[in-house]
Image (cartoon, rainbow, N blue to C red):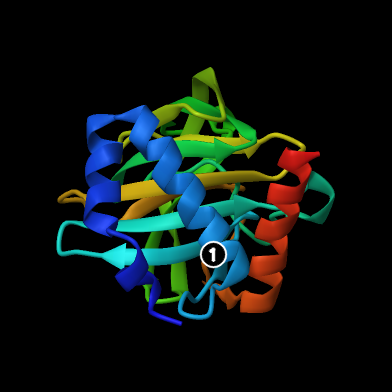
């Protein structure tokens, strides 16, 4: 079997995401997922701390292309009390196409405060080194000023600027997105965590290729039923 990169034009897929050309994007993304469901031997899926599985597809100097899969809600990993909250920002501008399922993207207005009595969270810096995330406690404190929720369904695209704090809540059903991450000048991500949470290091675990293929086949089977 040929390599995935030989079977699909990832540069073209990235261009379709950037131009938001939905009709050919839907067709190309469906073909990609069908192919991966049958043969994902040359991708290396990882389990993200936020509960989704992500499969890197292509990397360029300015961008990466990857597939995100949220399992059914009952089988998703949840953050623990020893980790930061799901609220975070990025070093990338993201463009996401919802192939299957749905999700809410909640942008969070964060205001830094001086006194712990006025704070809801502490700000943590996150530096990624391959699969390892170093989550470092800072002296900065913050409270939530407001939230803005947008709902996105299959066949739609949404964008997420790098510097905006947000969290993502996929629907109860499995959800699959194709994501283009565009590099910015930012070097460090931020996340909100408990005021007394110490610094820590986490490692993103490899997700079995066979299980990833099975999960994609389940998504396709549910859609056809």
Label 1 secondary element: helix
Task: Name the residue located 35 percent from the left edge and 36 percent from the top edge.
Answer: 24
Task: Name the residue located 49 percent from the left edge and 76 percent from the top edge.
Answer: 44
Q: Quadrant of the C terminus?
A: top right
* Residue at the far front in the pictured view: 1
Q: Is residue 63 left or right of residue 127?
A: left
Dot 1: few (<14), some (14–19), or many (≥20) neighbours within 10 Å? many
Residue 140 shows in this picture: no
Q: Is residue 164 above or below residue 215?
A: above
Q: Is residue 167 above or below residue 207?
A: above
Task: Name the residue located 58 percent from the left edge and 31 percent from the top edge.
Answer: 117
**Residue 106 percent across, percent down from the top left:** 53, 27
**Residue 58 percent across, percent down from the top left:** 31, 65
- Pointer 1: what residue? 36
Task: Name the residue located 15 percent from the left edge and 64 percent from the top edge.
Answer: 61
Q: Toward the viewer: 19 or 80?
A: 19
**Residue 6 percent across, percent down from the top left:** 31, 72
């Amino acid at each position: 079997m040929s390599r995935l990169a030989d079977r699909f034009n990832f540069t073209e897929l990235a261009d379709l995401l950037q131009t938001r050309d939905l009709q050919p994007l839907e067709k190309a993304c469906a073909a990609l997922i069908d192919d991966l469901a049958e043969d994902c031997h040359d991708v290396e899926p990882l389990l993200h701390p936020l509960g989704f599985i992500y499969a890197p597809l292509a990397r360029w100097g300015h961008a990466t292309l990857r597939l995100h899969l949220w399992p059914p809600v009952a089988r998703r990993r949840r953050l623990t009390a020893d980790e930061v909250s799901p609220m975070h920002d990025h070093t990338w501008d993201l463009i996401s196409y919802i192939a299957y399922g749905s999700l809410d993207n909640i942008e969070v207005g964060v205001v830094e405060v001086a006194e712990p009595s006025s704070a809801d969270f502490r700000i943590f810096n996150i530096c990624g080194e391959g699969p390892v995330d170093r989550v470092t406690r800072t002296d900065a404190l913050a409270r939530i000023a407001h939230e803005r929720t947008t709902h996105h369904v299959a066949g739609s695209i949404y964008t997420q600027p790098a510097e905006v704090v947000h969290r993502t809540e996929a629907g109860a059903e499995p959800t699959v997105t194709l994501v283009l991450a565009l590099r910015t000048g930012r070097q460090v991500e931020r996340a909100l965590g408990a005021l007394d949470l110490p610094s820590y290091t986490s490692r993103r675990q490899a997700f079995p290729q066979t299980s990833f293929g099975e999960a994609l086949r389940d998504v396709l089977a549910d859609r056809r039923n």
